[in-house]
Amino acid sequence: MPEMNRRQAMAAVLSTAAATSMLSPTSSIAQQEYPTRPIKLVLGFPPGGAADLSARRIGEQLARQLGQPVVVENRPGASGNIAATYVARSQPDGYTLFYGSNSTHAMNVSLYSKLDFDPVKDFEPIVLQGKTSNVLSVHPAYPVKSLKEFIDKAKAEPGRISVASGGNATSLHMALELLKETAEIDLVHIPYRGSAAAVTDVIGGQVPAIMDNVPSSLPFIKSGKLRALAVTSSTRLAQLPDVPTFDELGLKGYEVAAWGAFWAPAGTPRAVIARLNKEMNIALKDPQVMAVLYESATVPQGGTPEELALFAREETAKWARVIRRAGIRLD
């Protein structure tokens, strides 16, 4: 080979190697130094709620670990779809993250005829943050003292027992629909605009029962204004150790949780996802973060991105069946 051709060939090889090195997320200097500026964490919830408070606390801990501010941005509306769409269209550089939920990444694809984002193709999973369970409770004067008695009464009076919840197509509504399906009973769902109004009416005797997130019902259960029958978690909760799960009371496999998870736009470098997963798993074990989650009756989860992806797929299939059978739509 002539000397010039040999030099040209060697230059081409070196040029290709350099380009490959620049594109590789594991070798790029920029990725190794991530993050070099503030990170934005987008939520589809309004400020002040349990999800917002826990996300902010985790963000504060992440900021300490990463050495960069983590700024929480609330974009509520359309069951989280507005925030999800915004993040899905953001730069996949690790500086815009999404706090998704069972709504955005499991239920909405079956509840809406059209979404402006694809919960699988448009996002990279990072880590499952936590699960917040629900509880079925009745007014203390209502003549049932156990889940069995409640189910027996519902079978004896099909379509006549009303159960309140904090809203249509929420995890509370889904928990109720799954109960109807699993126990083979017919109940009347009464959706409210939030748990506060629902709890008020049940305590006031206007509605006999409620499916609610544990945090909002917990004070009234503790004070005796509500009688808890069962929790929707897979195991008993530390906040309600005397209240059995649906599963242990005979409804095998029954589990419902409102869950939160962290995601990034599709195409975010693998090295960035790996770094965020590592740091978020550390943050979820921080005592102060765990204390905030405990206050909202949220059980920290953690794990790998692959585990989150599998969990979301399983949840999507599970709720697609329930939603289809119940005929629930949001548009």
Image (cartoon, rainbow, N blue to C red):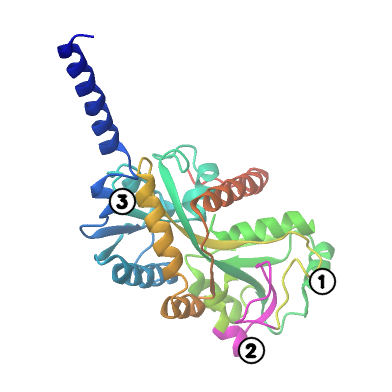
Please report whichever mark, 3 or 1, sits nearer to the chain's N-terminal start: 3
Image coordinates of residue 9 in percent, x first then y, are: 23, 17
Element under disc 2: loop
Q: Is the residue marked by circle 1 packed among few (<14), some (14-19), or many (20+) residues within 10 Å?
A: some
Is residue 269 visible in the rendered structure shown here? Answer: yes
Q: Nearer the viewer, residue 113 or 143?
A: 113
Disc 1 from disc 2: Cα separation: 20 Å
Q: Position of residue 273 (x, y in %)?
A: 39, 51
In the rendered image, which quarter is residue 122 located in?
top left
Q: Which residue is mark 1?
A: 148
Residue type pointed to by label 1: Lys
Residue designated by label 3: 94
Q: Position of residue 141 (x, y in %)?
A: 71, 84
Cβ atoms under marks 2 and 3 closer than 8 Å: no
- How far across and how far down the image is residue 254, in percent? 71, 60
Identified by mark 2, the residue type is Gly
> Which residue carries the number 2 mark?
224
- Choose between 105 and 66: the one closer to the eye: 66
Q: Nearer the viewer, residue 287 or 254?
A: 287
Rounded to the nearest angstrom, the CA distance separating label 2 from label 3 is 47 Å
Q: Which residue range is magenta in the image?
A: 219-241
Q: Is residue 192 magenta?
A: no
Residue at far bottom of view: 223
